[in-house]
Amino acid sequence: MLLALAWGFFQFVPLGSATPGAAPEGKGEMSVGEGDRVIQVFTYKPKGFSNGPVFFVFHGAKRNAEDYRNWTVALAEKHHAMVAAPYFDQDRFQAHLYSWGGILTKEGKLRDRKEWSFPMATEVIQTVLKREGDSKREHYLMGHSGGGQFLSRYVAMEPVSAKRVVAANAGTYAFPRLDWDWGYGFGKLPGELQAEARFKKMLETPMTVYLGMADTIPEGENFDGSAEANRQGRVRLERGRNFFEYGKKLAKVKGWKFNWTKVEVPNVGHDANLMFNDLRMERALEF
């Protein structure tokens, strides 16, 4: 009888096993959420990972979350960090339903909050940290292109517990102003989403605007060349610089804390792999 019980224990709770639901060592995948809210997450965990941070990495418009995971492996190995790259698929999160949070329909009507991409990302972050055994584990949010757009808006809409947010080479930003419509500003949103407290929170969030100095081509498959986007600048580099300066000036006028930094990478254009693996990424993360 005792032998049978012992065998059952080793079958279901193997020695040295990780927290139930934790990511495996090396490359892996997990799912977070249920039903229509399920998000697939591509993961990487260095051998012997224990107390290190987690890098949450947000893909761009190509929806290549697995690539983003892979491009972050070297950085993760260097800092003994885990990588978690959520996948927001094209079928459920077309265009701005991902990078702009999915708050409004194409017709400008408010969508149910459970359909927004922002709270889904928060659920991914909280669930992964919990599965790794420490809901307060140090973590960072990193995004490039559409993922940079996503994070630059996320910081205004969701509670942020990350040590730092890195928004890289975003095509457009939601400037903290009401005279530009949502996506480019905060106009046409419900009143509770336009509160000045959101702007204050946004500027106080530790965020790095991370820019490739060669990201200066005003065209391409996913480049927003609309009149609304061009008010922010002619190219992505200019838009990022203007976004940073606008936030800095607003914080000064209001007397708010300004916890953003700006890091620029010479000779790199719109390339997530090169941006993430440049040595300046460590400055962006403030290691």
Image (spheres, rainbow, N blue to C red):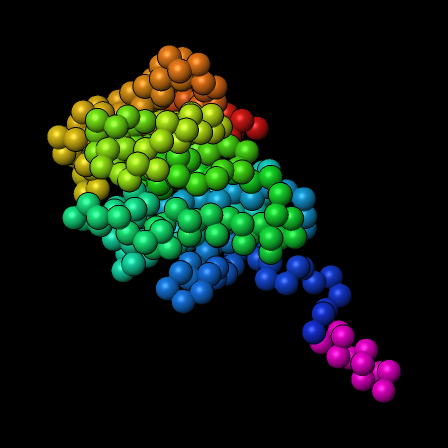
Residue 215 lies left or right of residue 26; in this view the side is left
Q: Position of residue 251 (x, y in %)?
A: 40, 17
Answer above or below: position of 2 versus 13. below
Q: Nearer the viewer, residue 184 or 74?
A: 184
Residue 149 lies left or right of residue 137; in this view the side is left
Magenta-highlighted stretch: main secondary structure?
helix
- Identified at 42% across, 58% down, the residue is 39
Q: Nearer the viewer, residue 125 or 109?
A: 109
Answer above or below: position of 35 versus 222. below
Furthest toward the left, the residue is: 227
Examine the image and state in which quarter residue 240 appears.
top left
Q: Position of residue 186 (x, y in %)?
A: 28, 33
Does the magenta portion include 248?
Answer: no
Q: Quadrant of the N terminus?
A: bottom right
Q: Position of residue 166 (x, y in %)?
A: 44, 33
- Identified at 56% across, 44% down, the residue is 54
Residue 90 lies left or right of residue 138; in this view the side is left
Examine the image and state in which quarter residue 18 appears.
bottom right
Q: Position of residue 238 (x, y in %)?
A: 26, 22
Q: Nearer the viewer, residue 190 or 172?
A: 190
Q: Which residues are magenta?
A: 1-11
- Residue 184 visible in the displayed image: no
- Identified at 40% across, 13% down, the residue is 252
Q: Quadrant of the C terminus?
A: top right
Answer above or below: position of 12 versus 190. below
Furthest toward the bottom, the residue is: 1
Does the magenta portion include 3?
Answer: yes
Q: Nearer the viewer, residue 122 or 225?
A: 122
